Amino acid sequence: MSILAWIILGLLAGFIGSKIVNKTGEGLFLDIILGVVGALVGGWLFSMFGASGVTGLNLYSLFVAVIGSIIFLVLYHAIFRRR
């Protein structure tokens, strides 16, 4: 995948994941970063269970990236959020 495709996928996955986890976005730049990292985490997790990871800019890859983004956001909030 090209860098532009990773950014688009990361933005979508980060935005959807942050809306699911905490009902607000983290901001455009942080959503992109969290989404791209989430895509990597989701791809790694799916490949650990025998499924294919991120395969391109399609709905399956978006699903994998959103799942990874949710997992990463939950860990991110558990570590960096102070109440």
Image (cartoon, rainbow, N blue to C red):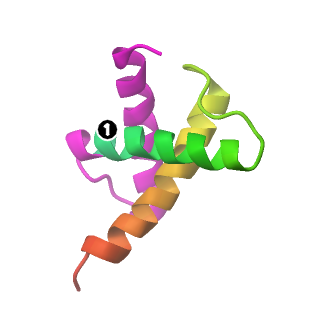
Is disc 1 placed on a helix, strand or loop?
helix
Q: Residue 44 appears in which quarter of the rendering? A: top right
Place of residue 40 in the rendered image (x, y in percent of width and height, measured from the top left): 48, 40
Place of residue 53 in the rendered image (x, y in percent of width and height, measured from the top left): 64, 34
Query: In this image, 46 relative to 34: left or right?
Result: right
The residue at 34%/70% (across/down) is: 77
- Which residue in the protein does label 1 denote? 32
Query: In this image, 74 relative to 50: left or right?
Result: left
Q: Can you say which quadrant of the picture contains the C terminus?
A: bottom left
The residue at 35%/18% (across/down) is: 3
**Amino acid, disc 1:** Ile
Nearer to me, 15 or 74: 74
Let me know if residue 24 is in the magenta part.
yes
Place of residue 63 in the rendered image (x, y in percent of width and height, measured from the top left): 62, 39
Let me know if residue 9 is in the magenta part.
yes
**What residue occupies the far right of the structure in this picture?**
50
Residue range corresponding to the magenta coloring: 1-30
How many marks the image carries: the answer is 1
